[in-house]
Amino acid sequence: MTVNILFAAQPDRWVQYETPLTEALNATGLAYDLRTEFAPQEVDYIVYAPNCAVQDFTPYTRLKAVMNLWAGVEGVVKNETLTVPLTRMVDEEGLTQGMVEWVTGHVLRHHLEMDRHIVNPGHIWDHSPPPLSKDRPVTILGFGALGQACATALLNLGFPVTGWSRSPKPMQGVTTHAGTDGLPKALSDAQIVVLLLPATAATENTLNADTLALLAKGAAIINPGRGPLIDDSALLAALDSGQIGHATLDVFRVEPLPQDDPYWAHPKVTVTPHIASETRPDSASRVIAENIRGNESGKGLLHLVDRSAGY
Protein backbone atom coordinates (compact mmCIF):
# COMPACT_ATOMS: atom_id res chain seq x y z
CA MET A 1 0.00 0.00 0.00
CA THR A 2 1.31 3.45 -0.91
CA VAL A 3 1.97 5.86 1.95
CA ASN A 4 0.77 9.38 1.11
CA ILE A 5 2.93 12.14 2.57
CA LEU A 6 1.88 15.78 2.46
CA PHE A 7 4.62 18.40 2.68
CA ALA A 8 2.95 21.38 4.35
CA ALA A 9 5.24 24.39 4.64
CA GLN A 10 6.04 27.67 2.93
CA PRO A 11 6.89 27.29 -0.78
CA ASP A 12 10.57 28.09 -0.27
CA ARG A 13 10.84 25.11 2.09
CA TRP A 14 9.60 22.73 -0.62
CA VAL A 15 12.38 23.94 -2.89
CA GLN A 16 14.88 23.07 -0.15
CA TYR A 17 13.33 19.71 0.84
CA GLU A 18 11.94 18.13 -2.31
CA THR A 19 15.17 16.45 -3.42
CA PRO A 20 16.66 15.39 -0.04
CA LEU A 21 13.30 14.16 1.28
CA THR A 22 12.69 12.17 -1.91
CA GLU A 23 16.15 10.61 -1.68
CA ALA A 24 15.70 9.79 2.00
CA LEU A 25 12.30 8.17 1.41
CA ASN A 26 13.67 6.20 -1.54
CA ALA A 27 16.36 4.78 0.75
CA THR A 28 13.72 3.36 3.10
CA GLY A 29 12.21 1.11 0.44
CA LEU A 30 8.69 2.35 1.21
CA ALA A 31 6.08 2.72 -1.50
CA TYR A 32 5.14 6.37 -1.06
CA ASP A 33 3.69 9.43 -2.75
CA LEU A 34 5.15 12.77 -1.64
CA ARG A 35 3.34 15.96 -2.66
CA THR A 36 2.45 19.48 -1.58
CA GLU A 37 -1.24 18.86 -2.35
CA PHE A 38 -3.58 15.95 -1.58
CA ALA A 39 -7.24 15.55 -0.86
CA PRO A 40 -7.16 15.70 2.97
CA GLN A 41 -8.81 12.29 3.41
CA GLU A 42 -5.96 10.64 1.45
CA VAL A 43 -3.07 11.83 3.65
CA ASP A 44 -1.19 9.42 5.94
CA TYR A 45 1.56 11.74 7.22
CA ILE A 46 2.12 15.49 7.19
CA VAL A 47 5.66 16.89 7.16
CA TYR A 48 4.83 20.17 8.81
CA ALA A 49 5.95 23.73 9.47
CA PRO A 50 3.55 25.55 11.81
CA ASN A 51 3.50 28.74 9.72
CA CYS A 52 1.91 26.99 6.72
CA ALA A 53 -1.69 27.07 5.46
CA VAL A 54 -2.72 23.83 7.19
CA GLN A 55 -4.19 24.80 10.55
CA ASP A 56 -7.32 22.66 10.70
CA PHE A 57 -6.48 18.96 10.86
CA THR A 58 -10.10 17.80 11.11
CA PRO A 59 -10.45 16.85 7.39
CA TYR A 60 -7.39 14.58 7.55
CA THR A 61 -9.33 11.51 8.61
CA ARG A 62 -6.63 9.00 7.59
CA LEU A 63 -3.78 10.88 9.21
CA LYS A 64 -1.33 8.80 11.29
CA ALA A 65 1.10 11.50 12.48
CA VAL A 66 2.33 15.06 11.98
CA MET A 67 6.11 15.39 11.74
CA ASN A 68 7.23 18.87 12.77
CA LEU A 69 10.17 20.20 10.78
CA TRP A 70 11.46 22.23 13.72
CA ALA A 71 12.60 21.39 17.23
CA GLY A 72 10.14 23.90 18.67
CA VAL A 73 6.48 22.85 18.59
CA GLU A 74 4.83 25.79 20.36
CA GLY A 75 3.22 26.83 17.07
CA VAL A 76 1.23 23.59 16.78
CA VAL A 77 1.09 21.78 20.12
CA LYS A 78 -1.99 23.68 21.32
CA ASN A 79 -3.97 23.11 18.11
CA GLU A 80 -7.13 21.38 19.33
CA THR A 81 -7.88 19.92 15.90
CA LEU A 82 -4.67 17.88 15.99
CA THR A 83 -5.47 14.61 17.75
CA VAL A 84 -2.95 12.26 16.13
CA PRO A 85 0.68 11.87 17.34
CA LEU A 86 2.97 14.87 16.84
CA THR A 87 6.74 14.48 16.54
CA ARG A 88 9.39 17.16 16.87
CA MET A 89 12.66 17.42 15.00
CA VAL A 90 15.53 15.71 16.80
CA ASP A 91 18.46 15.72 14.41
CA GLU A 92 21.81 15.01 16.01
CA GLU A 93 23.69 15.18 12.73
CA GLY A 94 22.44 18.62 11.71
CA LEU A 95 20.38 20.56 14.25
CA THR A 96 22.18 19.35 17.38
CA GLN A 97 25.65 19.81 15.94
CA GLY A 98 24.73 23.27 14.67
CA MET A 99 23.55 24.27 18.12
CA VAL A 100 26.68 22.90 19.78
CA GLU A 101 28.89 24.92 17.43
CA TRP A 102 26.91 28.16 17.90
CA VAL A 103 26.71 27.85 21.69
CA THR A 104 30.37 26.87 22.05
CA GLY A 105 31.44 29.75 19.82
CA HIS A 106 29.56 32.36 21.82
CA VAL A 107 30.53 30.91 25.18
CA LEU A 108 34.18 31.17 24.10
CA ARG A 109 33.59 34.68 22.77
CA HIS A 110 32.31 35.86 26.15
CA HIS A 111 34.81 33.81 28.13
CA LEU A 112 37.77 35.16 26.18
CA GLU A 113 36.27 38.66 26.25
CA MET A 114 36.80 38.92 22.52
CA ASP A 115 34.57 41.99 22.14
CA ARG A 116 36.94 43.93 24.39
CA HIS A 117 39.60 43.61 21.68
CA ILE A 118 37.51 43.41 18.52
CA VAL A 119 35.26 46.34 19.40
CA ASN A 120 37.87 48.76 20.71
CA PRO A 121 37.10 52.29 19.49
CA GLY A 122 39.50 53.86 22.00
CA HIS A 123 42.44 51.77 20.75
CA ILE A 124 43.17 50.74 24.33
CA TRP A 125 46.14 48.39 24.82
CA ASP A 126 44.63 46.20 27.56
CA HIS A 127 47.06 43.36 28.22
CA SER A 128 45.06 41.72 31.03
CA PRO A 129 44.16 38.09 30.19
CA PRO A 130 40.81 36.42 30.86
CA PRO A 131 40.60 33.60 33.41
CA LEU A 132 41.08 30.02 32.29
CA SER A 133 37.97 28.02 31.44
CA LYS A 134 38.16 26.13 34.75
CA ASP A 135 37.37 29.38 36.52
CA ARG A 136 34.40 30.36 34.33
CA PRO A 137 31.25 28.49 35.47
CA VAL A 138 28.59 27.99 32.81
CA THR A 139 24.95 27.14 33.52
CA ILE A 140 22.72 25.58 30.88
CA LEU A 141 18.98 25.97 31.41
CA GLY A 142 17.26 23.16 29.54
CA PHE A 143 19.12 19.88 29.77
CA GLY A 144 17.59 17.69 27.11
CA ALA A 145 19.44 16.41 24.05
CA LEU A 146 20.62 19.86 22.96
CA GLY A 147 21.65 20.95 26.44
CA GLN A 148 23.59 17.79 27.14
CA ALA A 149 25.36 17.93 23.78
CA CYS A 150 26.44 21.52 24.48
CA ALA A 151 27.53 20.50 27.98
CA THR A 152 29.76 17.76 26.56
CA ALA A 153 31.53 20.23 24.27
CA LEU A 154 32.04 22.75 27.08
CA LEU A 155 33.29 20.08 29.50
CA ASN A 156 35.87 19.07 26.91
CA LEU A 157 37.11 22.67 26.92
CA GLY A 158 37.49 22.65 30.70
CA PHE A 159 34.44 24.69 31.76
CA PRO A 160 32.63 23.72 34.96
CA VAL A 161 29.07 23.12 33.77
CA THR A 162 25.81 23.16 35.70
CA GLY A 163 22.62 21.92 34.08
CA TRP A 164 19.03 22.64 35.06
CA SER A 165 15.83 21.04 33.84
CA ARG A 166 12.26 20.68 35.05
CA SER A 167 12.81 16.98 35.81
CA PRO A 168 16.09 15.34 36.93
CA LYS A 169 18.57 14.63 34.13
CA PRO A 170 21.88 13.49 35.67
CA MET A 171 25.03 13.62 33.57
CA GLN A 172 28.54 12.57 34.51
CA GLY A 173 30.84 15.52 35.12
CA VAL A 174 27.98 18.03 35.35
CA THR A 175 26.33 19.46 38.45
CA THR A 176 22.62 19.08 37.79
CA HIS A 177 19.56 20.57 39.46
CA ALA A 178 15.89 20.15 38.72
CA GLY A 179 12.53 21.71 39.45
CA THR A 180 11.56 25.06 40.89
CA ASP A 181 13.74 24.60 43.97
CA GLY A 182 16.78 23.76 41.86
CA LEU A 183 16.71 26.86 39.65
CA PRO A 184 18.25 29.29 42.18
CA LYS A 185 21.01 26.77 42.88
CA ALA A 186 21.76 26.41 39.16
CA LEU A 187 21.93 30.16 38.63
CA SER A 188 23.83 31.14 41.76
CA ASP A 189 27.08 32.89 40.78
CA ALA A 190 26.97 31.61 37.18
CA GLN A 191 29.15 33.74 34.90
CA ILE A 192 27.64 32.53 31.60
CA VAL A 193 24.05 31.30 31.23
CA VAL A 194 22.82 29.47 28.11
CA LEU A 195 19.06 29.10 27.59
CA LEU A 196 17.88 25.98 25.76
CA LEU A 197 14.41 25.55 27.26
CA PRO A 198 11.23 25.07 25.23
CA ALA A 199 8.62 27.84 25.20
CA THR A 200 5.80 26.83 27.53
CA ALA A 201 3.65 28.58 30.13
CA ALA A 202 5.96 27.13 32.79
CA THR A 203 9.18 28.44 31.22
CA GLU A 204 8.05 31.96 30.27
CA ASN A 205 10.19 34.64 31.97
CA THR A 206 12.51 32.05 33.51
CA LEU A 207 15.06 34.85 33.53
CA ASN A 208 13.43 37.77 35.33
CA ALA A 209 14.49 40.44 37.81
CA ASP A 210 14.76 37.92 40.66
CA THR A 211 16.65 35.21 38.81
CA LEU A 212 18.98 37.63 37.01
CA ALA A 213 20.01 38.97 40.43
CA LEU A 214 21.32 35.51 41.36
CA LEU A 215 24.03 35.52 38.68
CA ALA A 216 27.58 36.69 39.18
CA LYS A 217 27.80 40.44 38.58
CA GLY A 218 28.64 41.09 34.94
CA ALA A 219 27.45 37.65 33.76
CA ALA A 220 26.72 36.96 30.12
CA ILE A 221 23.36 35.67 28.85
CA ILE A 222 23.22 33.54 25.68
CA ASN A 223 19.75 32.73 24.38
CA PRO A 224 19.40 30.44 21.35
CA GLY A 225 16.29 28.82 22.88
CA ARG A 226 13.07 30.85 22.74
CA GLY A 227 12.33 34.56 23.15
CA PRO A 228 9.68 34.28 25.91
CA LEU A 229 12.20 32.65 28.26
CA ILE A 230 13.42 36.15 29.16
CA ASP A 231 11.58 39.08 30.73
CA ASP A 232 12.87 41.70 28.29
CA SER A 233 12.31 44.69 30.56
CA ALA A 234 14.14 42.99 33.42
CA LEU A 235 17.07 42.07 31.17
CA LEU A 236 17.40 45.61 29.84
CA ALA A 237 17.37 46.95 33.40
CA ALA A 238 20.00 44.42 34.47
CA LEU A 239 22.19 45.38 31.52
CA ASP A 240 21.87 49.08 32.38
CA SER A 241 22.75 48.46 36.03
CA GLY A 242 25.77 46.32 35.19
CA GLN A 243 24.36 43.19 36.84
CA ILE A 244 24.46 41.60 33.38
CA GLY A 245 27.53 42.39 31.33
CA HIS A 246 26.27 41.30 27.90
CA ALA A 247 23.42 39.42 26.26
CA THR A 248 23.70 37.54 22.99
CA LEU A 249 20.17 36.89 21.77
CA ASP A 250 19.19 34.75 18.80
CA VAL A 251 15.46 34.48 19.50
CA PHE A 252 12.78 37.01 20.35
CA ARG A 253 9.08 37.30 21.18
CA VAL A 254 8.51 38.98 17.80
CA GLU A 255 10.55 37.89 14.77
CA PRO A 256 12.01 39.46 12.76
CA LEU A 257 12.97 41.77 15.60
CA PRO A 258 11.29 45.18 14.94
CA GLN A 259 13.66 47.92 13.87
CA ASP A 260 12.71 50.09 16.83
CA ASP A 261 13.30 47.38 19.44
CA PRO A 262 15.75 48.60 22.12
CA TYR A 263 17.85 45.45 21.77
CA TRP A 264 19.16 46.65 18.39
CA ALA A 265 20.75 49.80 19.79
CA HIS A 266 21.84 48.59 23.21
CA PRO A 267 25.66 48.56 23.46
CA LYS A 268 25.63 45.43 25.63
CA VAL A 269 23.40 43.34 23.36
CA THR A 270 24.33 41.23 20.35
CA VAL A 271 21.39 40.37 18.09
CA THR A 272 21.64 37.38 15.76
CA PRO A 273 18.76 36.56 13.36
CA HIS A 274 17.55 33.18 14.69
CA ILE A 275 20.47 31.31 13.14
CA ALA A 276 21.79 29.35 16.14
CA SER A 277 20.67 26.07 14.64
CA GLU A 278 18.56 25.98 11.53
CA THR A 279 17.12 22.64 10.48
CA ARG A 280 19.33 21.17 7.73
CA PRO A 281 17.24 19.65 4.93
CA ASP A 282 19.55 16.70 4.18
CA SER A 283 19.84 15.34 7.71
CA ALA A 284 16.31 16.36 8.74
CA SER A 285 14.90 14.50 5.75
CA ARG A 286 16.64 11.32 6.87
CA VAL A 287 15.17 11.71 10.37
CA ILE A 288 11.65 12.11 8.95
CA ALA A 289 11.98 9.24 6.48
CA GLU A 290 13.31 6.83 9.11
CA ASN A 291 10.54 7.81 11.51
CA ILE A 292 7.88 7.08 8.89
CA ARG A 293 9.57 3.79 7.98
CA GLY A 294 9.74 2.78 11.64
CA ASN A 295 6.08 3.55 12.20
CA GLU A 296 5.01 1.70 9.07
CA SER A 297 7.01 -1.36 10.18
CA GLY A 298 5.28 -1.41 13.56
CA LYS A 299 8.12 -0.02 15.66
CA GLY A 300 6.23 3.17 16.49
CA LEU A 301 7.27 6.81 16.31
CA LEU A 302 10.36 8.47 17.77
CA HIS A 303 10.55 12.01 19.20
CA LEU A 304 6.90 12.15 20.25
CA VAL A 305 5.70 15.40 21.79
CA ASP A 306 4.19 15.28 25.27
CA ARG A 307 1.11 17.48 24.82
CA SER A 308 0.69 17.98 28.57
CA ALA A 309 4.25 19.30 28.92
CA GLY A 310 4.12 21.27 25.67
CA TYR A 311 7.26 19.78 24.10
Image (spheres, rainbow, N blue to C red):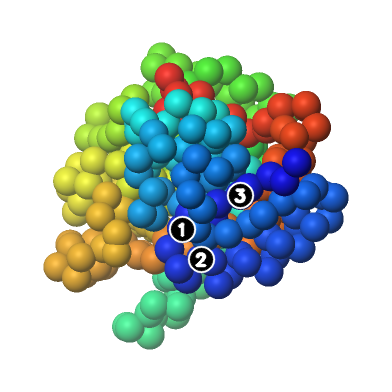
* Crowdedness near tag 2: few (<14), some (14–19) or many (≥20) residues, C-alpha within 10 Å: few
Relative height, residue 299 to residue 115 (above, below):
above
Q: Which mark is residue 13?
A: 2
Q: Dot 1 corresponds to which residue?
A: 9
Mark yes or no: residue 116 visible: yes
Estimate the x, y position of residue 140 in percent, counting from the top left.
52, 38
> Label 3, on which residue?
5
Q: Position of residue 283 (x, y in %)?
A: 70, 57
The answer to whether the residue labelled 1 contacts the one labelled 2, judged by CB atoms less than 8 Å apart, is: yes
Q: Earlier in the sequence, mark 2 or mark 3?
A: 3
60 or 201: nearer the eye? Answer: 60
Report whether 21 appears left or right of 14.
Answer: right
192 relative to 199, above or below: below
- Label 3 Cα neighbours within 10 Å, binned few <14 / some 14-19 / many ≥20: many
- Disc 3 residue type? Ile
Relative horizontal placement of residue 71, taking residue 75 as reference (left or right): right
Q: Please, what is the three-letter code of the amino acid marked with disc 2? A: Arg
